[in-house]
C-alpha cells in the first residue's frame, strides 16, 4: 500500500507549483495528507459523496474527487477553491496519485510473487501465468543471494540494499523473515561466479560501513528459468548454514564452494553418531582441550608439515611430535599419516555439524 508520506510529498510538490491547497482523506473521512490546516474546516457530507455515483463534486467552496484503486474508491481528494483552476489541479492530483497506487501495487505484487515463488507456494502453471501478468521475464540468467543480518528487523539494511540496486529494475529485494533479506539478481551473459562473489563482497562492505551491521552473504547456483528461483534460494540457504558450521571465518559462502561440508550437512544424525563411535569410541572431539584442537587445526592448515606447524605455534619440533603422539594414544589416529588425518578432519566436521543440529532442536 502506498504510504501517506509519498502522498504528502506529491501534494506538497503540486502545491508549490500551482498554489492550490490539497487534502487527501480515506473513505471514512480520516485525513491522510494535507497542505493546509483542516481541523476547523467544514467539508460537508463526505460520506454521502463517497456513496454517490459522481466522480467529482463541489461542496462548500471545495472540489471533491474520488481516487480509485481498480473499481473501488480508495481515497477522497479535496482541492481548496470552487473555481476552474482548483478543478483542473484536482484532476491532475487524482491522476498522479492513481498512477502511484498502480506502481506501488505492482511493486508489492512482484515482491509477493517472489516470496511465494521462493517458498514453493505456487503451482508451476501459476508461476508462468503470474510472471507473464507482472511482466517478469520467464527465461533469464539469475541467482539468489541471501543476506543474514545480525539484528532482527534491520530496516536500515534492506533500505541500503534497495538504494544500492535502485537502477536495476529487474532485480528483486525482499525480506523473507526477521533477519534474512533475499536478492534475486538478474545476470548478464558475461557474469559468472566470480562476478557474484564480487557483488556479495560489495554488499558486505556496504552494510558494514553504512548500516554498521555485521552480515553474512550466501548464494546459490546460477539458474536460467523463473521456476528455478526456489532451487537457487534453497542452495543459498544451505550455503548459509554450512558456512556457519564449517567456515565460521568466512562472511561470503557460495553453494558451488561448499566442498565436503555440503555432503556432511546432508547426513542423517544416526549415521553421524555411528561414525563418531567408530572413530573415537565413546570419546568425542569436543572433549579435547583447546590447546590440542588448536595444534590439530594448525597442523591441518599447514598440510601436515611438522616444521612449518612448529614454527607458527612457536614450539620446538620435538614438542610438537610429542603432542601428536599423545593425540595418537588418546584417539588411536596418527594424524601424521594422510588416511588418519583425513578421518580425523572429517570427524571434526561431523562433530561441528552434530553440535549445530542440537542447537537447532
Image (spheres, rainbow, N blue to C red):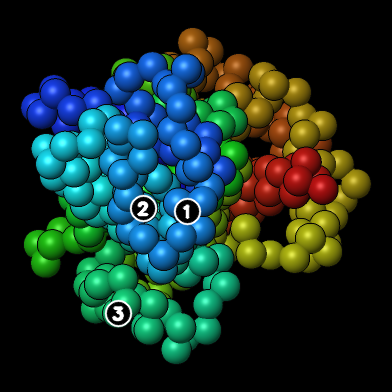
Q: CA distance from mark 2 to mark 3?
A: 31 Å
Residue located at (36% from left, 52% from top): 66
Q: Position of residue 144 (x, y in %)?
A: 37, 57
- Whether the residues at callouts 3 and 1 have beta carbons within 8 Å, the answer is no
Q: Which residue is mark 3?
A: 132
Q: Which residue is mark 2?
A: 66
Q: CA distance from mark 1 to mark 2?
A: 7 Å
- Whether the residues at callouts 1 and 2 have beta carbons within 8 Å, the answer is yes
Q: Secondary structure at mark 1?
A: helix
Which residue extends farthest right? 282
Q: Position of residue 351 (x, y in %)?
A: 72, 45
Which residue extends farthest bottom? 125
Of badges 2 and 3, the one in the foreground is 2
Q: Position of residue 131 (x, y in %)?
A: 34, 75
Q: Residues within 10 Å of mark 2 (few under 14, many from 20)?
A: many
**Nearest to N terminus: mark 3 or mark 1:** 1
The quadrant holding residue 14 is top left
**Nearest to N terminus: mark 1 or mark 2:** 1
Looking at the image, residue 341 lies above or below residue 251:
below
- Frontmost residue, 126 versus 304: 126
- Frontmost residue, 150 versus 78: 78
Amino acid at each position: 500500500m502506498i504510504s501517506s508520506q509519498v502522498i504528502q510529498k506529491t501534494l506538497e510538490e503540486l502545491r508549490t507549483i500551482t498554489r492550490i491547497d490539497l487534502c487527501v482523506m480515506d473513505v471514512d473521512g480520516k485525513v491522510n495528507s494535507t497542505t493546509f490546516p483542516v481541523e476547523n474546516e467544514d467539508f460537508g457530507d463526505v460520506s454521502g459523496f463517497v456513496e454517490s455515483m459522481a466522480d467529482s463534486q463541489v461542496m462548500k467552496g471545495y472540489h471533491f474527487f474520488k481516487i480509485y484503486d481498480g473499481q473501488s474508491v480508495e481515497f477522497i481528494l479535496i482541492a481548496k477553491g470552487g473555481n476552474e483552476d482548483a478543478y483542473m489541479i484536482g484532476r491532475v492530483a487524482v491522476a498522479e496519485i492513481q498512477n502511484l497506487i498502480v506502481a506501488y501495487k505492482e511493486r508489492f505484487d512482484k515482491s509477493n510473487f517472489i516470496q511465494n515463488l521462493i517458498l514453493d507456494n505456487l503451482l508451476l502453471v501459476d508461476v508462468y501465468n503470474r510472471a507473464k501478468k507482472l511482466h517478469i521475464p520467464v527465461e533469464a540468467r539469475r541467482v539468489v543471494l541471501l543476506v543474514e543480518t545480525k539484528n532482527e528487523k534491520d530496516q536500515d539494511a534492506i533500505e541500503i540494499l534497495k538504494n544500492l540496486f535502485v537502477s536495476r529494475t529487474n532485480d528483486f529485494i525482499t525480506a523473507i523473515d526477521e533477519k534474512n533479506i533475499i536478492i534475486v539478481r538478474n545476470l548478464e551473459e558475461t557474469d559468472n561466479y566470480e562476478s557474484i562473489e564480487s557483488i556479495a563482497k560489495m554488499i558486505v562492505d556496504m552494510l558494514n560501513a553504512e548500516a554498521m551491521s555485521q552480515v553474512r552473504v550466501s548464494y546459490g547456483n546460477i539458474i536460467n528459468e523463473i521456476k528455478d528461483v526456489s532451487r537457487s534460494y534453497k542452495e543459498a540457504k544451505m550455503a548459509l548454514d554450512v558456512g556457519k558450521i564449517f567456515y565460521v571465518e568466512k562472511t561470503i559462502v557460495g553453494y558451488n564452494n561448499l566442498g565436503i561440508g555440503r555432503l556432511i550437512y546432508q547426513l542423517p544424525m544416526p549415521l553421524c553418531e555411528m561414525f563418531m563411535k567408530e572413530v573415537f569410541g565413546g570419546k568425542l572431539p569436543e572433549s579435547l582441550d583447546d590447546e590440542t584442537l588448536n595444534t590439530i587445526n594448525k597442523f591441518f592448515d599447514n598440510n601436515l608439515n611438522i616444521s612449518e606447524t612448529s614454527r607458527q605455534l612457536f614450539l620446538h619440533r620435538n614438542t610438537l611430535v610429542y603432542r601428536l603422539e599423545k593425540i595418537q594414544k588418546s584417539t588411536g589416529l596418527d594424524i601424521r599419516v594422510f588416511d588418519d588425518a583425513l578421518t580425523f578432519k572429517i570427524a571434526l566436521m561431523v562433530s561441528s555439524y552434530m553440535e549445530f543440529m542440537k542447537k537447532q532442536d
